[in-house]
Image (spheres, helix red, strand yellow):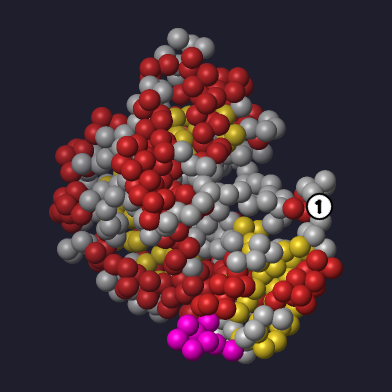
Amino acid sequence: MDEILEILEKDGRASVEDIAKMTRKKPDEIKKAIKQYEKEGAILKYKAVINRDLIKDSESEVRALIEVNIVPQKDLGFDKIAERIYSFPEVSSCYLISGTYDLLVVVEGKNLHTVSNFVAEKLSCLENVRGTATHFLLKKYKEDGVILKHKSENKRIAISY
Amino acid sequence: MQLSKVVEKMQPSGIRAFFDLVLGMKEVISLGVGEPDFVTPWQVREAGIYSLEQGFTSYTSNKGLYKLRLGIHRYLKDKYGLEYCPEEETLITVGVSEGLDLVLRAIINPKDKILIPVPSYVSYGPVTELAGGIPVYIDTSKDGFKITPKLLEKHIDKKTKAIILNYPTNPTGVSYRRKELEQINKVLLKYKILCICDEVYGDLTYDFAHVAFPTLAGAKKNTLYLNGFSKSYAMTGWRVGFACGPKEIIAAMTKIHQYTIMCVSITSQMAAAEALVSARKSVEQMKREYDRRREFMVVELNTLGLSCSRPQGAFYLFPSIKSSGLSSMDFSRSLLEEEKVAVVPGTAFGACGEGYIRISYASSLDNLKEALARIKRFLGKRK
């Protein structure tokens, strides 16, 4: 992967100037490359990774991982039915999976009730959906490579040879 | 009581007091650390924990776990095409520090001279003296902090026994290309001077492939190769290093090692063996991260007027602070007191480090940026 992408994937706020210094390139080159990546859709968006456990006033949110079994459609395979599912705003991620079920759908809602309603009223009654199994998420330890815990303090001594 | 005269003479005057000052201060941003800011890769730590769970709590053979020596054999062969016999030509040591101590004690007879290009890592001189040798310091500050064949030849006489060659170099980050090393090697072979190469930063070489000294033509028989896990695998606290070289030197070193140390901690050896198997990728990732910080810092320091050449390895920069008009010690002390940024005065690494400071970029980019802002403010006040 291009070094620019590698840097941005770790820190979406890295400035063009800093990236230029780190890669020994000209700021204009970096700007152009990033523009191109954005245009191609290689860079889709920039967002913060938030640890909701630490936000006291945030509305509590429930997340569920739902295994979905599907009858594939002729010519279209899984894609068409996947599209019908991932287009719901409640769905935050949707993956086609190998193994005992077909789609892994991640759903977010205000509470247990909203999520179960979504499964009962929207998801399971879709034509081609043969069955679902819903797993509610209890605790997040690590997400997208980030460990969701207070940064542990530096254990190095302050000066050494 | 009359203490050993060699030891009494040894205390490096001002530096200790400066270090105590840093350690006593809170909320310091430290660019003075000689170790990685990463923790040891998890799979390596896990291997250490697992070995304890399995009950591996005994001594190992004096030479070290065979599994680890074999791992080192494979690593050197893969990386440099270098072959050392794991039975007779390899010894596991407590970091490179012990390896260095052992080899000096193994080869030095009273008054033998050991060449040490300076600025250098702090232990080379004292350890030479403890072994009964005479350190001969070679000032490299006028040659871009590199030892040259000419400089080398000028310092050789009949009592010269060995040279301690460390590259990439702590504290300057300087390293050598194959051509330069070949010229040095020629001189060493001509005068039959042993090369003790400390290549602990070898895996952290950025602009070209690191050249292991024993891979040079005719050098292997004349070289004692030292390396360790501390810097590249972020394993400083585990204390594991290794020495490879001609079997008679390794045998002599093993003799001393068996009476003084017996063996390296088995937990650390188990973890190190795992590092060679599964952490090569982590080393590459850490190296890429250091490389970016290096490029960033070189630009920034030069912008601040602290002229700094682009080092090729390790995680150190050695910028000149002469434009400030302060001595290394005054600069470091004032920077610490006024802005709470810790750096190491260049003089810690030899008198010829005067006019320089060592900055370690083994620190997060955010930390580096904050430190730079403070240094800028510090310099601004002096204009």
Q: Residue furthest top?
A: B383
In reply to whether residue B284 is colored magenta, the answer given is no
Residue B210, by quadrant, is bottom left
> Badge 1 is on which residue?
A59
A24 in relation to A52, above or below: above
Mark 1 closeness class: few <14, some 14–19, many ≥20 residues within 10 Å: few
Parent chain of label 1 = A
Left or right side of B260 for A34? left
B207 in relation to B379, above or below: below
Question: Foreground: B121 or A39?
Answer: A39
- Horizontal and vertical percent for residue A137? 76, 69
- Look at the numbered disc 1 and give the secondary structure of its residue: loop
- Horizontal and vertical percent for residue B249? 36, 66
Question: Foreground: B315 or B247?
Answer: B315
Residue A89, by quadrant, is bottom right
Which amino acid does the dot numbered 1 rest on?
A: Glu
- Horizontal and vertical percent for residue B364? 54, 43
**Magenta residues, dominant SS class:** loop
Instruction: Give the residue displayed 42% in from the left and 14% down from the top.
Output: B325
The magenta segment is: A71-78
B181 in relation to B306, above or below: below
Instruction: Give the residue displayed 75% in from the left and 78% down from the top.
Output: A134
In the rendered view of the protein, which quadrant contains the N terminus of chain B? Answer: top right
In the rendered view of the protein, which quadrant contains the C terminus of chain B? Answer: top left
In reply to whether residue A77 is colored magenta, the answer given is yes
Question: Foreground: B120 or A101?
Answer: A101
Left or right side of B72 for A153? right
Q: Is residue B278 visible?
A: yes
- Horizontal and vertical percent for residue B265? 60, 68
